Image (cartoon, rainbow, N blue to C red):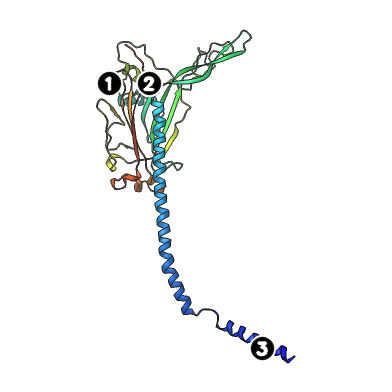
Amino acid sequence: MNILRWLLSTQLKPSHKQNKNSGFTLIELLVAMLIAFLVITPLLSFMISVLNTDGQEQAKANSEQEIKAALDYITRDLQQAIYIYDATGIACLSGTVDTSTDNTCPNASTTGNQLPSGTDKVPVLVFWKREFSQNVVETRNSSDAVQFKDDTFVYSLVAYYLIQDGSPNWSKAARIARWQIKDGVPNTAARVTVGACEGFPTEKYLPCPDKGFKQFDLSQKGITLQAKMNSWTRGGIYNQDPVVLVDFIDQTTIAQGAPAAICSTDFSQIPVAATTVKTGFYACVDSVSANNRSAAEVYLRGNAQARLIQNDETKVRYAQSKSSYFPSANIKVQGSSFIFTK
């Protein structure tokens, strides 16, 4: 029993002594916290700086990629153009030219816009194109069964807009939207009812033309091709809305410091040069060039800052010192076909 007591006492004494001496004093804890603060704070600042820089570079890269993709899309569209409206032509279609004193828009309406209109919706590119339609012309046998379907081409009117209307669904910068109406395909099959297409009471179409569509008229005599195209009027009320192609387009006007638009000789600037013009998206157009084809120069400038600052338009305007946040691209396109009239 004495031996057991002795063993327990000898083992407990060192353990008790060790526990008594373990732990840190208050001064040691304060020193450790100070050292940790001095080491961790610069590391956190460095990490935050790295994350901010990465976010800025990612915003720039996204804007540049979207600008190039949008320009490629517009280019493919314009390559099918047969006629591109210049600034005068767009003014005619917009109903801003007085036909009583200006003969560039014969027969055009002076009381209404022939194109979709809206707040801060500026038409920049308006053109007719010859569009490929696949498997739309049916050939039937005597039993009225479809034997095969042919491809064809139809005419379409296309308009690109620069829009900045303060919509909460989009950025504080501007955006580009595309609008289109196209013709139907004439079809004489007996099963198609005459007048089945709204606005076309005497023709058979399958598919139908879009609402409001009316083909341009080249039968007028004694006026130029441009005057004929400028006199186009719509066929009714549209039900197609512009579809946004790309957001985060620079919304800065020339008066606010944006670079001025530059066009080649014989090209008409759209929108027309003014200090209130936004040059994030503009075009230069030659409706009828020397080879009787339409040509256009298209300029785009993105706004990566609007991706980072989304609640204040005044803080995301163009400035030369921040030009890296405003990637730009441009291209010159010639229509692949043309229309000719005497």
Residue 202's spot in the image, x, y percent?
50, 12
Query: Outermost residue toward the right?
Result: 1
Residue extending farthest top: 142
The kind of residue on which mark 1 rests is Asp
For disc 1, the marked residue is 102
The C terminus is located in which quarter? top left
Residue furthest front as drawn:
3
Instruction: Write down the quadrant of residue 71 in the picture.
Output: top left
The mark nearer the N terminus, 2 or 1, is 1
Quadrant in the picture for residue 129: top left
Q: Badge 2 local density, few (<14 within 10 Å), some, or many (20+)?
A: some
Residue 261 or residue 71, whichever sits in front: 71
Q: Disc 3 versus disc 1: distance between alpha carbons?
A: 117 Å
Type of the residue with mark 3:
Ser
Percent position of residue 85, x then y: 34, 24
Query: Callout 2: helix, strand or loop?
Result: loop
Comes first in the chain, label 3 or label 1:
3
Q: Nearer the viewer, mark 2 or mark 1?
A: 2
Please, what secondary structure does the residue beneath circle 1 have? Answer: loop
Left or right: 204 in relation to 108: right
Q: Quadrant of residue 177?
A: top left
Disc 3 target residue: 9
Marks 3,1: beta carbons within 8 A: no
Q: Is residue 113 above or below residue 280?
A: above
**Mark sitting earlier along the chain (2/3):** 3
* Residue at the (46%, 79%) spot, across then down: 27
Q: Is residue 39 visible?
A: yes
Q: Which label was assigned to residue 336?
A: 2
**Residue 207 makes an appearance in the image:** no
Report the Cα–Cα distance between label 2 and label 3.
104 Å
The residue that appears at 32% across and 47% down in the rendered structure is 322
